[in-house]
């Protein structure tokens, strides 16, 4: 773990996919996203009709975290949040989550949903600090490991947004 850090957040772009995939495979070896999944998400993150918001966190020109959110109508879904192991406990997960909640507010979403591995207590505690509540389970959601997901919901994401700066 490193000291508390405030890395630079910026919009994820196509050239970030390879370093993000390396981090993805390290953190989620059984159920890592594919290159195509990231390309598809980024395709919906640009322009006036954007329904996605993906950001990366850089520390000394190295990607140390990333996060993404999808919106549809008045509902947003946190797709992913990941932080390099050596940055756990620095507040970076909260910074990324704050940015996603800011995006949900900008998309005028009244609720934010997410799925979290049932065995990822660290992430669950982060979400609870921001006001998310457990509302159910998805059995065998994470494959191929057949790990259950805890479904969590936050109503009125604008009340959980804290002031951070994002650079595009």
Image (tube, rainbow, N blue to C red):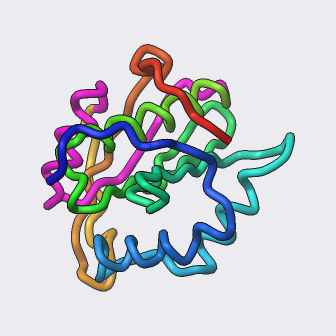
How many discs appear?
0
94 left or right, relative to 15: left
Is 93 placed above or below 157 here? below
Is 165 placed above or below 22 here? above
Residue pictured at 33% horizontal, 69% vertical: 141
Is 131 placed above or below 93 here? above
Foreground pick, 54 / 125:
54
Q: Which residue ends up furthest to the right in the rendered image?
A: 48
Foreground pick, 57 / 32:
57
Give the x, y percent position of residue 160: 39, 20
Give the x, y percent position of residue 12: 61, 56
The N terminus is located in which quarter? bottom left
Give the x, y percent position of residue 33: 47, 75
Q: Which residue ends up furthest to the top in the rendered image?
A: 159
Residue pictured at 47% horizontal, 47% vertical: 78
Q: Which residue ends up furthest to the front in the rendered image?
A: 60
138 left or right, relative to 161: left
Give the x, y percent position of residue 90: 22, 42
Residue pictured at 29% horizontal, 25% vertical: 131
The C terminus is located in which quarter? top right
Span of residues in magenta: 108-132
Residue pictured at 22% horizontal, 62% vertical: 85
Q: Quadrant of residue 35?
A: bottom right
Is 3 placed above or below 63 here? above
Q: Quadrant of residue 76?
A: top right
Q: Is residue 115 magenta?
A: yes
Foreground pick, 134 / 85:
85
Q: Is residue 12 magenta?
A: no
């Amino acid at each position: 773990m490193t000291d508390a850090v405030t890395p630079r957040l910026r919009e994820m772009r196509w050239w970030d996919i390879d370093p993000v995939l390396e981090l993805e495979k390290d953190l989620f070896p059984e159920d890592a996203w594919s290159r195509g999944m990231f390309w598809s998400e980024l395709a919906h993150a640009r322009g006036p009709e954007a329904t996605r918001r993906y950001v990366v966190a850089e520390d000394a020109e190295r990607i140390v975290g990333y996060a993404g959110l999808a919106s549809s109508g008045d509902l947003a879904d946190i797709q992913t949040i990941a932080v390099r192991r050596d940055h756990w406990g620095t507040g970076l997960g909260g910074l990324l989550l704050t940015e996603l909640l800011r995006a949900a507010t900008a998309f005028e979403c009244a609720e934010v949903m997410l799925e979290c591995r049932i065995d990822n207590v660290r992430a669950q505690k982060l979400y609870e600090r921001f006001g998310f509540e457990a509302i159910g389970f998805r059995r065998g959601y994470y494959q191929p490991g057949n790990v259950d997901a805890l479904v969590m919901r936050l109503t009125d994401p604008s009340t959980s947004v804290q002031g951070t700066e994002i650079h595009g």
